[in-house]
Amino acid sequence: MNRYPLWKNLLILALLIVGFMYAIPNLYGEVPVVQVSALRGASLGDAEKARIEKVLKGADLGFLAIEQENERITLHFADTDVQLKAQGQLIDALGEDYVVALNLVPATPKWMGELSAAPMYLGLDLRGGVHFLMEVDMIAAVAQAEERYVSDLRALLRDDKIRYLSISRAGGGVEARFRSAEDRAAAQERIGREFPALLLNESEADGAYYLVASLSDKEVLEAKNFALQQNVLTLRNRINELGVAEPVIQRQGSDRIVVQLPGVQDPARAKEILGATATLEFRMVDGNGDITAALAGKTPVGSRLYRERNGNPVLLERRIIVTGDQIIDAASGLDQQSGSPAVYVTLDSKGARQMLQTTKENIGKPMAVVFIENKSHTRMVDGAPVKESKTVEEVINVATIRDQFSKRFQITGLDSPTEARNLALLLRAGALAAPIEIVEERTIGPSLGAQNIERGFNSTLIGLAAIVLFMSFYYRVFGVIASISLFSNLVLLVAVLSMLQLTLTLPGIAGIALTIGMAIDANVLIFERVREELRIGNSPQAAIHTGYERAWGTILDSNVTTLIAGFSLFLLGSGPVRGFAVVLCIGILTSMFSAVMISRALVNLVYGGRKLSKLAI
């Protein structure tokens, strides 16, 4: 009577095996590591690996392992004290051409990694790291939007041969000055048709006729959102240099960005990279210059020597065609003719006019894209902080001009779609769209994170043990079965969180503890229903069947109401509240499965198919 078919038992067993497989990696913990990566222009090969090993051996700092992959060298250490000492030695030995970052990596065996079995990501409060709250200068963002309109309006009136005295930013908008009311009227009609989003106001003073174009509220909002989104992209691109796993870069409110770098214990290095400024320049390649002479120090007049990413020298003209400030958008894709990777670039009107003139005169000649990054850092000299700056310039792409183009064009000659996406990101987010300022900075040490993990684990363990003791004493064999299903629920919950690679924080641990306490409610409802059936004279087998069947409706109702509350927290909350809500909702689903399916399967295995006179409940 109380038996599951074989397929159902096998399905439950398979789910439990998979759950254990994906939950176990969380027991291995993490290993402190030092990650060394090269900045642009520097190499990181076998010679640098041998140099790193020599430095650490000379300082008597032992390491567990050294790995080299994806243009990064990772050193594993036994504890954080040796890790910190090793970082200091490597920074002094390698210099500023390399990033030496602290991190924590999972100690999961490789065979588990091949099965995509990995531990949960840990948040800043559990792993330690650096937290920055950055504020974007929205006044500057709106000013830059107005500056773009200055160039657009000049180009528009010049193309339509409408005479004006001057166009400049003034009084919270773009001010155009004319000699006559007729010129102003013609300009107003043309600008209104081309830029309907601008608000136009007329005025007269000192014998001149003025037309002031101001941004509408919608345009101002779009300019601010654009600046915020571009800065998020730029920061994400720069954080890749730190070698940080699972960084959090997200907007907060209308003008702030939250940056969390778990595992990073060097806020000074993080601030150097986050605060760097970058730009792009398009220049023609000097095809007539002598590279050999330029390498010997005899650079032709009007040209300058640069180097590509692979170190190859290239001679470029000093005249700049277009800068990164004139790029409106960039997206990666495929060339329609050859199918090769390409990047599609869109310029503003000023950049489009300059690009059209240049390409018209230089068809068949190569043009280069130069990436320029200015970095500043502070070092101690005789006990006093000294701020130093460094400029990195490299040619990221050289392509031949096939035809004249202006506002929109494509860059080809790229090796792979990945390089195309990276180049599009550099073009789109090479420079900050608006200045940012760090308004809040917090550093959480790994020891504090380990302490939080220990306390959270202990609280969950104590709660689980208390529930097991109570259930075993009060419900006898059924209490033991409930305890096993409760443990299975915990395993499945951790497995789902690990498979989804969600970030676990302290509120998430609170959600796990709460889920354990709530999960046992379903078993209590079932067992009390079974007891009630026994009291009214039903047989033990009938009591088991009826208890599980009739308690299901109550269990479903109670869990659905809690799910609604969890979804509301997720939709309306933010940060830690959403993390708690996610764990709570997943925990409710796994608890319903374990309390009904797993416990019923265990009860069937113990009592199913037997003639019973009583139950140990």
Image: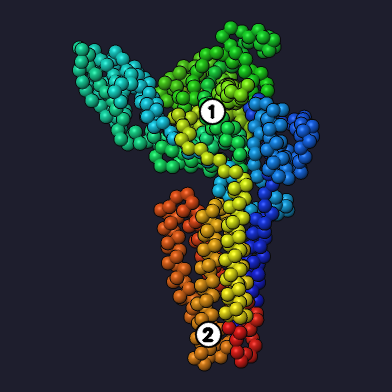
Going from N to C along the chain, the mark reached first, 2 or 1, is: 1
Q: What residue type is labelled 2?
A: Arg
Q: Do we see residue 8 in this rendering?
A: no
Residue 310 falls left or right of residue 542: right
Disc assigned to residue 276: 1
Vertical arrangement, residue 515 with respect to residue 539, above or below: above
The quadrant where residue 112 appears? bottom right
Residue 291 placed where, x, y %? 67, 13
Q: Do the residues labelled 2 and 1 touch (CB within 8 Å)?
A: no
Does the rendering let one see residue 471? Answer: yes
Q: Who is closer to the viewer here, 578 or 477?
A: 477
Q: Helix, strand or loop at disc 1?
A: loop
Image location (x, y in percent) of residue 153: 34, 22
Instruction: Give the quarter of the image for residue 335.
Output: top right
> For mark 2, what is the residue?
531
Identify the residue at horizontal 67%, vertical 59% (top origin).
Answer: 24
- Image quarter hosting the N terminus: bottom right
Q: Crowding near pointer 1: few (<14 within 10 Å), some, many (20+)?
A: some
| Between 282 and 509, the one nearer to me in the picture | 509
Q: Which sits in the foreground, 457 or 53?
A: 457
Q: Residue at x 47, y 27 (%)?
A: 327
Cα distance between the residues tagged 2 and 1: 70 Å
Taking the image as shown, residue 573 lies to the left or right of residue 596, namely left
- Which residue does the image show at 65% across and 26% down from the upper left? 96
| Left or right, 118 with reference to 78 | left
Residue 170 is left or right of residue 317, and the answer is: left
- Could you tell me residue 338's position as x and y percent? 59, 33
